[in-house]
Image: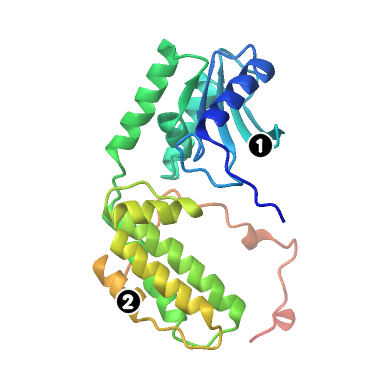
Amino acid sequence: MIQKESITREKALRLSREIFSSRYPEASFAVASGSIIRGQGAPHSDIDLVVVYKNLPTAYRESFFYEDVPVEAFVHDAETLQAFMEDDLKKATPAMHHMVATGIVLPAKTQESTQLQRYARDILSKGLETPAWRIDLLRYLVGDKIDDLKDERPFGERASLLYALYETIGELRLRIDGRFIATGKYLSRSLHACDPAFAQRLEAFMSQALQDPQAKVDIETPTALLDLCGGYIFDRFKLEAPQNMRAEAKWLRAFEEPASPESVTHV
């Protein structure tokens, strides 16, 4: 079987320019981004392309191959791009900001593209401020998953808990450091950038726990990592819901006729 080779940054930029001129000729500019553009591409990495028009009826994204290279295009005008960037910020996962901030403008820099990249980089440089209640909630959730892993469980439950633990304690560590959170492969990269020793200990634990489904999970490592993030929290933990979390109780009028006492099943 022939091993696919990674494409070079130079080739990725050439393809991006060709795609821009042939597929989006009316666009104002584009930003080519992704691991290939950063010089960190793998054999199956794709090209990310943020395309900006003066005006569009609606934003869209599309995926296609160009010379056998996968391409993901995110097509916007200024207002739709701003809306998506703000939506990312609400979730504390500014993926669009990263693409714009770390990418290369095509076909050439403009005043608008310069302002866009400056805006994205400014947002990223400020980091993420997390309120104390959310840190406490994450500590609670991590501890809850560690407690669940103390008991023997079917492999599916065990694996689900382990991955949930990895994501939750990863988010906790990033938020404590004032960093934006990440998901998927980007979570591992973000953790290594934030705290390499923490990331290595967590990954070693995950590898060991998933290697032998029959062995009992050793919770010493995740417990120690949680201690570095403030420690286990359960007793007297309390989190008040927002005051606007109210809705009409439809279940109070779900039936036209009230159930008779005889029809009510008691457990």
Q: Is residue 240 visible?
A: no
Residue for badge 2: 223
Question: At 32% across and 76% down in the image, what residue appears?
Answer: 223
Q: Position of residue 187 (x, y in %)?
A: 44, 54
Q: Quadrant of residue 200?
A: bottom left
Horizontal side of 66 relative to 89 (left or right) equals right
Q: Mark 1 or 2, which is nearer the eye?
A: 1
Vertical placement of 201 versus 84: above or below? Answer: below
Using a 10 Å C-alpha cutoff, classify the residue at mark 2 as few (fewer than 14 neighbours), some (14 to 19) or many (20 or more).
some
Q: Position of residue 250 (x, y in %)?
A: 63, 57
Q: Secondary structure at mark 1?
A: strand
Q: Position of residue 246 (x, y in %)?
A: 49, 52
Question: At 71% across and 68% down in the image, what residue appears?
Answer: 258
Residue for badge 1: 69
Vertical placement of 9 versus 235: above or below? Answer: above
Where the C terminus falls, by quadrant? bottom right
Residue type for callout 2:
Thr
Residue type for callout 1:
Val
Q: Quadrant of residue 89?
A: top left
Q: Position of residue 227 (x, y in %)?
A: 26, 72
Q: CA distance from mark 1 to mark 2?
A: 43 Å
Question: Who comes first in sequence, dot 1 or dot 2?
Answer: 1
Question: At 58% across and 20% down in the image, what residue appears?
Answer: 17
Q: Is label 1 in contact with label 2 (beta carbons under 8 Å)? A: no
Horizontal side of 257 relative to 81 (left or right) equals right
Farthest residue, direction front: 2
Q: Is residue 208 visible?
A: yes
Q: Nearer the viewer, residue 261 or 220?
A: 220
Q: Secondary structure at mark 2?
A: helix
Question: At 28% across and 51% down in the image, what residue appears?
Answer: 131
